[in-house]
Image (cartoon, helix red, strand yellow):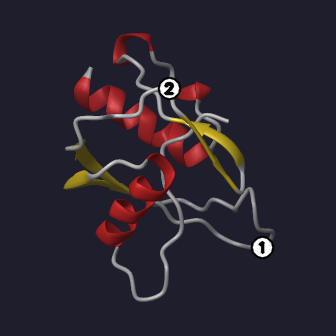
């Protein structure tokens, strides 16, 4: 599975707090949240929970930890995860596993390529 990092909001948590927590939990990195990039504006059913709708919020961010764990394997409830960078010149958003990420990947290519 190839996807952008992320996860679900916990009760009482704001969207940027969720971003900070997820990046710490999934990749053990400290980030600085940038501007809002995109919020899902079409229906997507959850791939993990039947009868659940997904809404995703994407932010630009900077990793401020100088020890970025590129290639390090992390384990969680979904199995092994690995943080990796891909050059926009070599990147195809259709390689992403989920429709929302594919849509946002296309927006990123349009905005930054």
- Name the residue nearer the viewer: 64 or 12: 64
The image shows residue 45, relative to residue 88, as above or below, that is below
Q: Residue at point 78% right, 73% down?
A: 51
Mark found first going from the N terminus, 1 or 2 = 1
Asked if the residue at tag 2 contacts the one at tag 1, i.e. Cβ–Cβ closer than 8 Å, the answer is no
Give the structural element (helix, strand or loop) at label 2: loop
- Name the residue nearer the viewer: 56 or 9: 9
Q: Residue at point 71% right, 57% down?
A: 77
Q: Residue at point 26% right, 47% down?
A: 60
Mark number for residue 71? 2
In this picture, residue 76 sits left or right of residue 23: right
Crowding at dot 1, Cα within 10 Å, few <14 / some 14-19 / many 20+, comes out as few
In this picture, residue 66 sits left or right of residue 79: left
On-image quarter of the N terminus: top right
Quarter occupied by residue 47: bottom right
- Residue under label 1: 51
């Amino acid at each position: 599975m190839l996807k952008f990092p992320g996860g679900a909001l916990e009760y009482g948590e704001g969207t940027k707090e969720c971003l900070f927590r997820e990046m710490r939990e999934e990749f053990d990195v400290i980030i600085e949240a940038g501007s809002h990039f995109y919020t899902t504006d079409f229906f997507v059913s959850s791939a993990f929970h039947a009868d659940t709708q997904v809404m995703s919020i994407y932010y630009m961010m900077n990793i401020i930890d100088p020890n970025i764990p590129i290639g390090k394997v992390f384990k969680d409830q979904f199995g092994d995860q690995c943080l990796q960078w891909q050059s926009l010149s070599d990147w195809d958003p259709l390689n992403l596993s989920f429709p929302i990420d594919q849509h946002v990947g296309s927006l990123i290519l349009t905005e930054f390529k």
